[in-house]
Image (tube, helix red, strand yellow):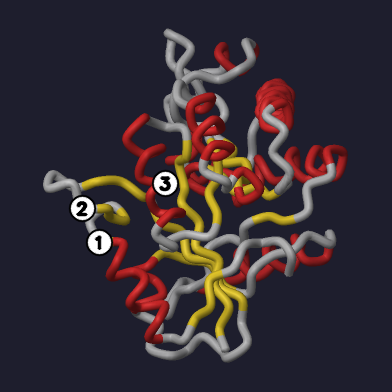
């Protein structure tokens, strides 16, 4: 039996996504979601979660690439923010920045991460799980700052770096294996595999029985009002999980 965590990313990014996430919970398409606390609709998202009974399944979607940061120092760093103070996603698109940033940048990023963590806890959300927008928590320059803060604030689980790939370069494979082993060595609860619906559908039964997989989806509505994972109907995502005899479950208890 394969156990599956189906996470709806980007909760709080817009009113439409918030509604799509809430409907996905109601229809049993997802088991978890993660919140972008710096986005304009974060407060509304939390209200929806509490009203609809899924607030215990809301983790933190750390965000260093979209919208505006919560703190001021990072707004002065050109690798992270535009002149108007909004995130520019520059560092996420350049490999060197994903590996190494300056001491001043590190201090600013650490300050922003802690501010987002503190805002997450201010909502009274109990899950203590973390992943990130554009997978920034898997970058060396970020994870080295993040892990001490996760320990300080008592996080229990974290998303792996994406490993549901049939083919990948040797350097990428080495980095991903090293990163995932590091998370487990730190004692955090993780899945065995992580990827998207497309990643999982291309694996052709290579996921071992009794594995715990995490599948990320991005709930939204298409032009016809159909609930989708970007361009894939959510019902189709569920069909794939059913074909694998995957049993959806939250991160807790595990």
Foreground: 237 or 145? 237
Q: Give the side of residue 240 with respect to residue 54, left or right.
A: left
Residue under numbered circle 2:
226
Note whether residue 41 is visible.
yes
Q: What element carries label 2?
A: loop
Residue 196 location (% of width, % of height): 41, 64
Question: What residue appears at the point 58 percent right and 78 percent down from the top-left corner?
Answer: 3
Structural distance between the alpha carbons of marks 3 and 2: 13 Å
Up-down: is 78 above or below 14? Answer: above
In the picture of the structure, the residue carrying the numbered disc 1 is 233
SS at circle 1: strand
Question: In which quarter of the view is residue 67 placed?
Answer: top left
Mark 1 vs 2, N-terminal side: 2
Which label sits on residue 250? none
For marks 3 and 2 on the same chain, the one whose residue lies earlier in the sequence: 3
Q: Judge by depth and name the residue closer to the eye, 127 or 192.
A: 127
* Residue 63 spot, x, y in % from top left: 54, 34
Q: In this view, does 204 lie above or below 95?
A: below
Which label sits on residue 21? 3
Locate the N terminus by quadrant. Answer: bottom right
Circles 3 and 1, Cβ within 8 Å, touching? The answer is no
Q: At 35% across and 79% down in the image, what residue appears?
A: 202
How far is mark 1 from mark 2, CA to CA? 7 Å
The front one of 192 and 167 is 192
The x and y percentages for residue 187 are 84, 62
Q: Splitting the image into 4 quarters, where does residue 145 fall?
A: top right
């Amino acid at each position: 039996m394969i156990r599956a965590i189906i996470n709806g990313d980007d909760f709080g990014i817009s009113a439409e996504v918030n509604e799509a996430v809430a409907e996905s919970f109601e229809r049993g398409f997802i088991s978890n979601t993660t919140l972008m606390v710096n986005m304009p609709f974060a407060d509304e998202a939390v209200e929806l979660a509490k009203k609809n009974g899924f607030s215990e399944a809301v983790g933190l979607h750390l965000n260093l690439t979209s919208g505006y940061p919560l703190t001021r120092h990072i707004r002065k760093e050109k690798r992270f923010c535009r002149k108007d103070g909004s995130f520019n996603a520059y560092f996420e698109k350049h490999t060197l920045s994903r590996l190494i940033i300056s001491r001043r940048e590190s201090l600013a990023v650490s300050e922003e991460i802690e501010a987002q963590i503190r805002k997450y806890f201010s909502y009274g959300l109990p899950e203590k799980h973390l992943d990130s927008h554009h997978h920034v928590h898997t970058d060396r320059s970020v994870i080295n700052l993040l892990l001490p803060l996760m320990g300080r604030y008592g996080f229990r689980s974290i998303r792996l770096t994406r490993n549901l790939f049939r083919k990948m370069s040797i350097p990428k494979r080495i980095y991903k294996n090293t990163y995932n082993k590091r998370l487990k060595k730190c004692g955090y609860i993780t899945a065995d595999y992580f990827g998207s619906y497309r990643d999982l559908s291309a694996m052709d039964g290579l996921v071992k029985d009794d594995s715990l997989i995490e599948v990320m989806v991005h709930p939204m509505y298409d032009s016809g009002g159909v609930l989708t994972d970007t361009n894939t109907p959510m019902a189709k995502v569920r069909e794939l999980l059913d074909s694998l005899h995957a049993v959806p479950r939250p991160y807790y208890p595990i």
